[in-house]
Amino acid sequence: MRGSIRSFGWIVALAAVWACSETERDSEAGLARPSGLVVLKRTPLFTTTATLARADVLVADSEADGVRVLQLADSQRPRFLFGPLLFQPLLITAPGYPTEVSAVGGSNVPVVVAFAPGQGALHFLWVPEVRFGATSQFQDGQVRLASLALASEGLVDPLSSLDAPVATVSILGTPEIRDRVEGALPAAAVVVDQQTVSGAEPPQYRQRLMVAYDPLTGPDGPTRLVVVDVSVGLPASSADPVRTATAASTSRGRIAVEGLVDTATVAPGLRRFVRLFDGSWIATSVASGSGRSGLTQLRVPSFEENHSIQISRIAVGGPVPSVVPITDTDQPGFLALRSDAPLVEVFRCPPDQSCVRVDAELSSPFGSAEEPGILRLRESPVVAGAFADDAPLVVQQSGQGAATLHDPDAAGGVTHLVHRDAVATFVVGPVDGLQVATTRTATFAFPDGQVGREPLPLLEALFARTEGAVGSTIDGCDFGPSLSCPAVPRPPPACADLRLRELPVDALYRASFRGELASGFEAERLIQQDDRCSDGSGPCRYRLEFGSAAALGTDLARRLYRAEIEPDPGAGAGPIDRVDLYLTCTTDPPVNSDPQDLEIAFDGGASLRLHRVEGRSFEALGETEPDVRVRGTLSTSPTPPGSTVPPALTDCDPDTLELFAYRIYPAGSEAVLTLESPEDGVLEVLQRAPATEQARFDTEGLAFTWRSAAGPFACDLPSERPTGLAGEFPVTGSPCESTDTCGPGRSCIFGDGGDAAVDCPGACPVRCQSATRCFIGLQPRVCPEIEIRANGAGPVALDLRRRPRAGSTELIAIVPEQTVYVPARRAFLTSFPGARSLREVRLTDSGIFESVID
Amino acid sequence: MWAATLASAVLGCAREDLGIDPFREGPEQLHVPFGAARIPPLAAASQPSPEDVLVVASTNFDQRFNAGTLSAYGLQALSELAPPRAASCADQEVRFDPSFGGDAGTPAHRAAVRIQSASGPLTPFSFKGAWVLALPTRFDQSVTLAQVNPSAPEPGGILNCRGPSEARLGATDCSARFVIRLGFDDPFDVQRVAGLGLVVGHVTDPDPRQRAFTGSPSIGYLSVISEARLDARLGPPGGAGPVSQPPPLAFVFGLDGARAVQAPGPDPVSEVFVSTDREFAGEVPVVRIPTTALQDLPPPPPGRLTADLTDLGNRLIEPEDRIDLVPTTQGFGTRGLLHLPAEAGLPARLYATVRVFEVQDSDNSVLAVLSAEDGRLRVQGLLEVGEELGQPVPYPFAPPGQRWLYVPDTRDDRIYVVDVTSDVPTVRARIDGRAVRTLPSGRQILARTLATPLSIVFDRRGGRRFAYVTNFENSTLAVIDVSDDNPLQHCVVARFGRDRALDGSTEAEGATL
């Protein structure tokens, strides 16, 4: 036995799910391989205080060779129906790897059908309603009545020796059927209608079945479809069918093939029937090979109808193993789930007409699908889903209260989609206006302390979040339950080093590696001396031009480097909050009297003020290095104390203008995650993590991988200063302080009146032939970095991969199989065969709750 | 229950010593068998021949003996030893024959040679007019070659790994010429790649746990045995002779051990596929490598490689494409890899069996259907079934236009018949490995007719069809009658060999029913 029912209230807070509570252990469920699901409506549960809606979900447990009964009621813990053995959940035997279970319309029917491809059989299970919380031994039913062999006349039930006898009949015993399908193997089978035979005692039911057989004529041959009626009767004595049948060695039920209703041929490779609405079905074909996959719409006659099978082919753009019916009474349709891409194709199905793909452009935060009627979703393809027309979609944004993303009274409904990687999302609205349910912010988890010293988990957290706003994963830390639901005591955090922060998802994030770089330069403006300065004809004026680099900046950078990283011992260490520099273009000496202040003095009074931008200080997270970007501004006032700045600077631009950007980095290798703005640059340092030689950034989800096979990351250092960069600005020449730096045959040229004695930068003569079309540029260091533009909105997403249990690091295998909607609980139930569990997602007025049932 | 991973868990640190001769209990007996292959006379490869043999490699993994063995059995005789097929599997008599027909005077055993221990999967290929078997040998870091001639009148001619006057290597019957020493540990799978030679996957990763924690890159190792080197080994004695230097190694980025190697076909191919052995913090189970990357490799570094990988140099190969099942399966370890070319309207597909780890030691497995069209690996379908699926084998008798696989579950002693005609795999049948056996004493026990099944070989003979299965865990050979078109009627009809579990016990010592 593998586990138990574990109910957890989970509330979605900005797409991160947190555990609220864990309820008591209920029963050993022991699901072996839950696959197909079907919902049966049950009569309400009456309690002393309320009337609770009820439903049963039958779970095809393929590797257990049977079907289990899961009882659900609003606000009650889910529970499996117990069997005759105390504390053991009931398993209704259905030999042959049952993968599908079907019933007519989800109604309160006594007989359901399980398809077992490993036996080539249909099993008829008698599942009358049982009191909630009861065990099966005290009431009739919950047994296999009969089996219908679909591919063999002499089929032997391998479990017959261990199970009570059941009635068995072969569909091939009917000549007109045998002639059509003999030798073929069944690929899919469902019950399409059911009827109670009036007056029959014991009760008898007619079942109309639809069975698809694989082609007998090669890979391109058609799939044969047969619709056949059978009658299934309950045992003569219904008092205790288990004991009665065993003791008397008689069959539990009765079964007879009444006859063939109709046959048809459809596309090869059919594997699943999905009911759209009464009488209308979609058959999915995923035959290997080009041009052999597709959808077929079928109208199958009910017992009250008298028409042949009506078939229409539906074109889709790729393989579609499954579809999700949209049972919106105003706009019925379905979603075709593409397995080759994260796309769903949206179809509407007008009454009595063939389904057609909607022609509306469906917008998505994940981009355009380039064709009308196709919705692009997060990266992983969708493999299961279900529609709800009566459920709200409410998310609770941390610190912002609840946000209703879809109201039950609004047009359309909520469709729950489960992706191949077990992340669940939602789409809302009518089929011709389907939208991805999104939020604007998301909660990120960042590790503090030692846990976060490695950049890998840090970046994984970011990428997981930005890719689909799903829960982050950090090795060794199950951080989800470290938060609690409102009014519920917060459980001890699983990883005390985690720090949760709410951040916008409409933002630019940058994950950067910095090698052992102490300083860098990013000039964004080019300062150019005005000609009028040269002839001394008037007050100095500076013109600001855009450019990629500036000679002046290099000099400043060098000086700042000295000041910042290698401060004068007497000047004290620490970040530079404010540096004033003075520009001059005259022969006057610098006016600032303190040579330690890093000024470049210019008369004319314009002050270049370097300082950290207020309000944009960067968190060092325990680091002491200053950060990160310092912006230069050019302003007209005030002049520093002690300076002798002429008041006349009337021509200078009176505004404070951004001059250039300058970055100062810590000396060690590190990874830094920043939140940035294209306009304002770095807004905040979210995390910094020292990088070690073994550190690795692995971001294959973004098709970008950083690797370090034998050492640390390396920044690309320019070996020499490049020249000849195209530009639209006058030549300035490379900066120099003396002639020695200009190379053979050239001299450092200072500005008019300038000389090396003053700290005014000069320039080497430019070799460029055109004095107006090129300039010297600096190539900044290029370090590995990833720029991530988060989507404009993050989808509401649930990460179903981890068990929502405090302290748990248990992972589950995660490929989902089928999703159904249970109106009685306003819950979606998804089977995960590999995880041997079910996941329930409940939509309530206060949020989304999720639990594990295994 | 033991799992097939035993085959990969045993460290390659042992050496052959003088000890018990594996033929002591009869040369027909198997001992911890792994690989198997059907070898017909070359001239009659496509049609059943009375001379066809089944060759089985016994690994001697527990080192009870001082060598492994390579045994050949006549398929005609084996088929005649199989009891008649009953109307249903429930009524089927299972024949337990410890002597492979010897006690009945119709021995199926035809030849055997002693080879290095821990020689696991075997790959047959024709080379210059003769059948050759290649067996990677984990204990010895080598590949053993053996020549097979089913038409030879003498046992020594049927199986041979030594030339005239050549000295035996240790306790084996092979000479050094037929044993190619490799430059790295744990060769596990070998694949014939036309135009290139043999590509050997080494299942070892030097230190995967440390790698998982530090995040440093994983490296898989491939040895490439060139055609020229094969020619030197398999040519006439006295020819150019083998070179002593190990064949070159390729280091494949992103693989934690090369578990299985597959080439798309018998003709010269442009790519090979390799699956990883990684079992935790998994990343990439299958990669695609152009064969050009495996050509003209530099000579191997001197001495044995160590885990520090300081000498990677230009031998590091970046696969052209890789596929990562981690988003869908979490931790994993691949167990088998099969490439089937496009045929009869069905596209080329890769089938990878993956053991999935929900927790540290869970029992869960997946059959993944992968495509490699347009130069890109993609997941086309997944079937979660079984506890630890092994190497899938194409079922040659599937209905026209359909593609079925026989997939052994090495942990649960079952074989799944999976229909992969569609990219939505479907279980068609499940063959359980249990049957009642009546011992000579009259006691009845529940015998494991399938016990960690590893290799499956199909054969058609006398109007019947059979699947022969090596039972790694109890050293027997199971026979499944697959004559019926309905796979539900496929069941074990016979089991050959004296059973012995890895702990040395036999079924006779077990509980009576």
Image: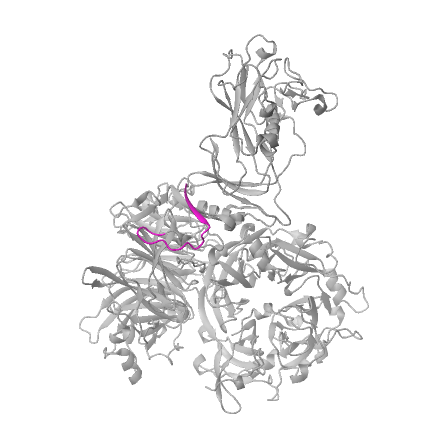
Query: Magenta span: helix, strand or loop, mainly?
Result: loop
Q: As displayed, is residue A201 above or below residue A680? A: below
Q: As displayed, is residue A496 above or below residue A198? A: above
Residue A644: quarter of image: top right
Figure quadrant of the N terminus of chain A: bottom left
Q: As displayed, is residue B238 above or below residue A158? A: above
Residue B474: quarter of image: bottom right
Q: Nearer the viewer, residue B16 or A773?
A: B16
Counting from the top left corner in percent of width and height, residue A428 is at 32, 46
Q: As displayed, is residue A531 above or below residue A336? A: above
Question: In the image, what residue occupies the spot 46% across and 72% down?
Answer: B430
Q: Outermost residue toward the top?
A: A537
Q: Outermost residue toward the bottom?
A: B441
Q: Can residue B394 be seen in this view?
A: yes
Colouring style: one colour
Figure quadrant of the C terminus of chain A: bottom left
Counting from the top left corner in percent of width and height, residue A209 is at 31, 66
Q: In this view, does A589 lie to the left or right of A16?
A: right
Does A488 appear in magenta?
yes
Residue A21: quarter of image: bottom left
Counting from the top left corner in percent of width and height, residue B489 is at 45, 76
Q: Is residue B260 visible?
A: no
Counting from the top left corner in percent of width and height, residue B479 is at 54, 78
Q: Is residue B195 left or right of residue A411?
A: right
Q: Which of B411 and A696 is in front in this view?
A: A696
Query: What span is in magenta?
Result: A484-503
Does A609 appear in magenta?
no
